Amino acid sequence: MELKEYQKESLAKVKIFIEWLKKAKNEADKRNANTESVFEDYFDFPQAAWKKISQEPYRSKKNGLNQDLPNFYLKIPTGGGKTLLACHVIDIINRIYLERQTGVVLWIVPTNQIYRQTLNHLKDRNHPYRQVLDIASSGRTMILEKNDRFSPQDLNDNLIILLLMLPSANRLNQEVLKVFKDNGGFTDFFPSEDDFQGNKKLLESIPNLDCFNQNHGIFGQVPKTSLGNTLKMLQPIIILDEGHKAYSQIAQETLRGFNPSIIVALSATPPKGENILVNITGQQLNREEMIKLDLHIISKATTDWRNVLSLTLEKRNYLEEKAKEYQANTGEYIRPISLIQVERTGKDQRKGIFIHSEDVKEFLMVQCGIPEDQIAIKSSSTDDIEGIDLFSEECPIRYIITKQALQEGWDCSFAYILTVLTNPESKLSMTQLVGRILRQPRARKTKIKDLDESYVFCFRPRANDLLQQIKQGFEEEGLGDLSGRVSIETESEVAAGTISYHYRNHLRKFEGKIYLPRFIIQEENHWREINYEMDIEKNISWINVNFNPLFEKTLASDEVKDQNIVVTLSPQPDELIKPIIMQSQKGHLEADTIFFTRQLLDIIKNPWLAYEFSKKILQGFLSRYSKKDINNNFLFIIQLSRQYLESERDRLAEIVFKNLIKEMKICFFLLSSPEGRYTLPSKINIQKESKTLIHRDHTPLQRSLFEFNPEEYFNEYEKSVALYLDKQEKLLWWFRNLAGQDSYSIQGWKKNKIYPDFITSKKDEQNPEDYKTIYVIETKGEHILGSKDTVYKQNIFELCNQLGEAKSWEDLGQEFSSKRVEFQLIPEGDWESRINKLFNI
């Protein structure tokens, strides 16, 4: 699976931190080894590493051995791919910090729903999560549950992922206590019961082991041969899923008591004061086409819930027609699903005033003629979707009725509509269901507006209360910065919850007259914006790929064995542990050309060509290595090949793009026709409850194009830039450009469009009430300077400036004939001086 740009940037930041962490750990080990105590000051090595990459304070923690415990959060909204990132982070930690491919990862989840889904994905060798782990471990990955056993040899040969459900309740339940129960399954990791000296040395080294004999019998204390004690000795990596959940103090102590080497927490909404290393915003997800926005809330003023359901059916049927048209044009299947929230689902709860799941099912079947196999109920007692592949074209399900069973962990991007059949006074919250309809199918916009947005139908709601619930839902999903993309509509589709803003009064003369250039292509007798798939990707000449640099990569020799120190006691009284060198498992993966081909199809769309490349790559490595070496390194070869082909694709796409420019087939134009330009919007719709951005001294903005600028449209860096721009005397106006279908974007030779952050104008020196130059500004965080994405955007901007200088906008009319448009990429470390330079300060 090809990573999104924000995912690549996130992993780059994690890698930088882990590299600093390794250096700091080496320094700490050096200080601890100094017996003369030259270093008197305490050295908190995780904090030292943190200070290298962040100005935020670091929250230090200790594990059960009182060792410094590196810990950080990945703040990733719903739909952002946190599990995929976690798999990559495991590889980074193992390679750089722990310098190994094997070891134990303790993966903690809070609910059964997330547990089952994560387990299924990790066990599926064809799933991207498992493929990342297999590549990291050279195909030697074991996915285990708490009742499974593993041996020292398993540990030596494999990357072991142990999945454990740790409830958020303020107690340890029986499932967790079983982890600490002695069951004899891990005796190979411990000295024998009668080995008094061995047990003594083990407890001196790891004093927090649970023991049988707390009263010091004839053999003294004897550690339990439990899974819990084994984990304490192995000091696992801990992945804490949904880290924002109310894990109790007892649960937190339990986690630290496993003596982890590092804790990585995943959350859409981390608690305050935690170490947030990666902070992904909803805008970044929207920019990468991960979520369905806008979210439309349709408020039905009726006393009969059946009327709301009828509207739902009408909308879902309309969406399915659009989906069929989309499939006819692209071959990609979508079956829109409606989630219906009711108040009761229990067998004995149907009688009374509350809306029951069976009432809804009966209405759908009897009154609406919906076949029974298209309706599913998901509750604590009934699970009609268990084991069902909702993405399959053979699956008929179009309606899922639930109360609160579809919460975190449930994931189906075909869910487009949430229908809420609860009374306004009901305490039943809909916030956790909002995120279930936001994921975009295949993480790629269809370019059909109706299929790229999501919908909520409501029964007798109070508009303000409803909006607050939705916004709360966005906050809980880590999408708070997108809450302005929610619109409440009545049946007449009048926007009841928004306010329209036009340009400031003195800027009204520019409405509909601020234009920005695009890369456009001529098609017969008209121009259109270029399309990556149609104009660039399909013209890539893959025949020009030179595989020799790939074949020069070094594979691991068959004789190289992974070695781990397994905690087994040495018979020598002065030696606590000894390394056990065991025979590594032989390569058990066969190089499979068909499997290889499937891994390349998202890069090379032609399956025959992907198949030929797979064969050619394997043959190329076979000319230098034995078949045994190829099998042992098969997944590593796939990883290398994907990286190389992605790089080659972008290189060849750049050639296609620039050749089309040279041939004048692609132009960077401003034309009088709408297809040949982008026009800045003349109005924006803002939610009534939105909070506007203001200066630090609480004074209002003065130079923004629109008087109102929702604070949620900006991250902290972007806020600083916006407020600084607003103070520039030579700036006439500035505009915050968001990612989205209706926003200004630049399509280059890579698939993802560039959505600049700001559009600004500089006053005309001869006429200060007009402007001479428009600056299109993209801001970049300091941690990703020099990344491929940053270099690419810089190259595109330089090309835009080069082509723009050679053009005149005369055909647009007198009001735009003498304007200039410049594109600027501004790095975080130098942003103030760069802005000063633009505005001649």
Image (cartoon, rainbow, N blue to C red):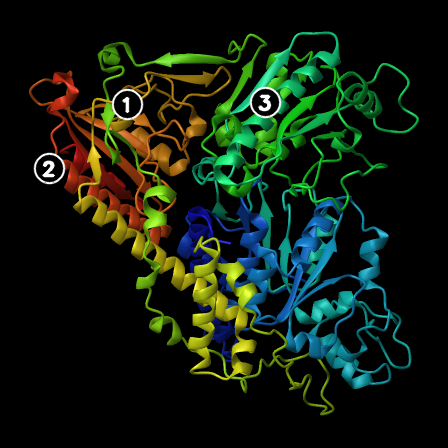
Give neighbour class at mark 2: few <14, some 14-19, many 20+ (Cα, 10 Å).
few
Cα separation between marks 1 and 2? 21 Å
Cα–Cα gap, marks 2 and 3 = 47 Å
> What residue type is disc 2 on?
Ala
Q: Residue furthest front?
A: 524
Query: Which residue does the image show at 30% across and 43% down from the upper left?
Result: 748
Tell me which label, 1 or 2, sits earlier in the chain.
1
Residue 465 is tagged as: none
Using the image, determine if residue 157 lies above or below residue 780: below
Mark 2: secondary structure: loop
10 Å neighbourhood of mark 3: few (<14), some, or many (≥20)? Answer: few
Residue 44 visible at all:
no
Front residue of this view, candidates 206 and 540: 540
Foreground tag (1 vs 2): 1
Q: Where is residue 196, by image quadrant? A: bottom right
Residue that carries the numbered disc 3 in the rendered image: 318
Q: Is residue 29 left or right of residue 239?
A: left
Q: Position of residue 101 (x, y in %)?
A: 56, 72
Depth order, front residue of 260/39: 260
- Helix, strand, or loop for circle 3? helix
Q: Are marks 2 and 3 in contact (CB under 8 Å)?
A: no
- Residue at image point 89% right, 71% down: 215
Residue 254 in the image: above or below residue 657: below
Residue 232 is left or right of residue 599, and the answer is right
The answer, for residue 810, to whether it is visible in the render is yes
- Quadrant of res 336: top right
Task: Give the residue at mark 2.
Answer: 806
Instruction: Answer few, some or many: residues within 10 Å of disc 1's Cα (few below 14, many 20 plus, some between 14 and 19).
Output: few
Q: Which label's residue is closer to the chain start, 2 or 3?
A: 3
Q: How far across and down, in percent of the image, does residue 580 sit? A: 67, 85
Query: How many numbered marks are there?
Result: 3
